[in-house]
Image (tube, helix red, strand yellow):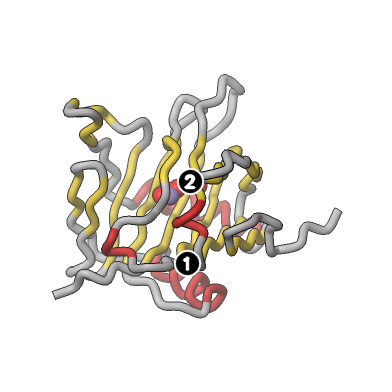
């Protein structure tokens, strides 16, 4: 089956490229990222309570790319290979420059990401977000903020998901926990932060 890269979703502009990376290169990237990134398990504030986020993460970028969400302010780690190599590939695919990336490590099916939009003010009005998957396939759920319409995708090893235009304004996205015995997954979401000094 051939999957068209542009997804058929109203009020959105989303492209999905499975097999975007050569699989042996994607295997190498996965090992390098798990070994070399400064992973931490951070806390966010939800309804006045500090809650451990259900995954590991690492914020990387230009020195002034500071990002805040849910009460957590992240200072960037300096760019390192192979993240900057993957960034260059994403910039070519998206035809846009990125100055930061949020790396997420889902250790198993118990790790997840709640439904949200990447719509913080520092991401600009119509953010372009390039999201690369390495490792276990996970179900990625889109939900329309007004109609409740859902669109599900299975993000595969070496794939690229591009979200742009009005997507963040009208849709939320997230990754649910699963009881299936699955391996781990590293995701890189490249962004451009505009609140630079
Ligand atoms: O892991 C994913 O595919 C989603 C990551 C995400 O939505 C984010 O970092 O904002
Ligand atoms: Mn997101």
- Residue 61: image quadrant is bottom left
Answer with mark 2 or mark 1, whichever residue precedes in sequence. 1
Q: How many marks?
A: 2
Looking at the image, which residue is at 25% across and 42% down? 70
x, y percent for residue 158? 60, 55
Rate crowding at label 1 as few (under 14), some (14 to 19) or many (20 or more) other CA atoms within 10 Å.
Answer: some
Position of 11 relative to 43 (above/below): below
User: What residue is disc 1 on?
Assistant: 86
Near-viewer residue (16 or 37): 16
Identify the secondary structure beneath mark 2.
strand
The quadrant of the rendering that contains the C terminus is bottom left
The residue located at (19%, 26%) in the rendering is 49
> Which of 151 and 5 lies nearest the eye of the viewer?
151
SS label for mark 1: helix
Q: Is residue 183 left or right of residue 119?
A: right
Q: Which mark is residue 172?
A: 2
Residue at the extreme right: 1
Residue 22 appears in the figure: no
Task: Give the foreground label among 2 and 1.
Answer: 2
């Amino acid at each position: 089956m051939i999957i068209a890269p542009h997804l058929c979703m109203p009020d959105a502009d989303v492209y999905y490229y499975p097999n975007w990376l050569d699989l042996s290169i994607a295997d190498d990237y996965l090992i390098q990222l798990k070994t070399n990134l400064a992973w931490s398990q951070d806390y966010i504030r939800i309804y006045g309570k500090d809650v451990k986020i259900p995954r590991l993460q690492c914020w990387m970028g230009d020195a002034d790319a500071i990002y805040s969400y849910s009460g957590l302010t992240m200072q960037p780690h300096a760019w390192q290979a192979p993240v900057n190599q993957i960034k260059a590939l994403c910039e070519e695919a998206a035809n846009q420059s990125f100055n930061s990336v949020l790396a997420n490590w889902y250790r198993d099916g118990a790790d997840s990401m709640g439904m949200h939009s990447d719509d913080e003010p520092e991401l600009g009005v119509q953010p372009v977000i390039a999201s690369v998957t390495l490792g276990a396939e996970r179900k990625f759920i889109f939900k329309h903020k007004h109609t409740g319409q859902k669109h599900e995708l299975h993000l595969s090893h070496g794939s690229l998901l591009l979200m742009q235009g009005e997507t963040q304004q009208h849709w939320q996205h997230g990754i649910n926990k699963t009881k299936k015995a699955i391996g781990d997954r590293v995701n890189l979401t490249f962004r451009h932060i505009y609140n630079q000094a």
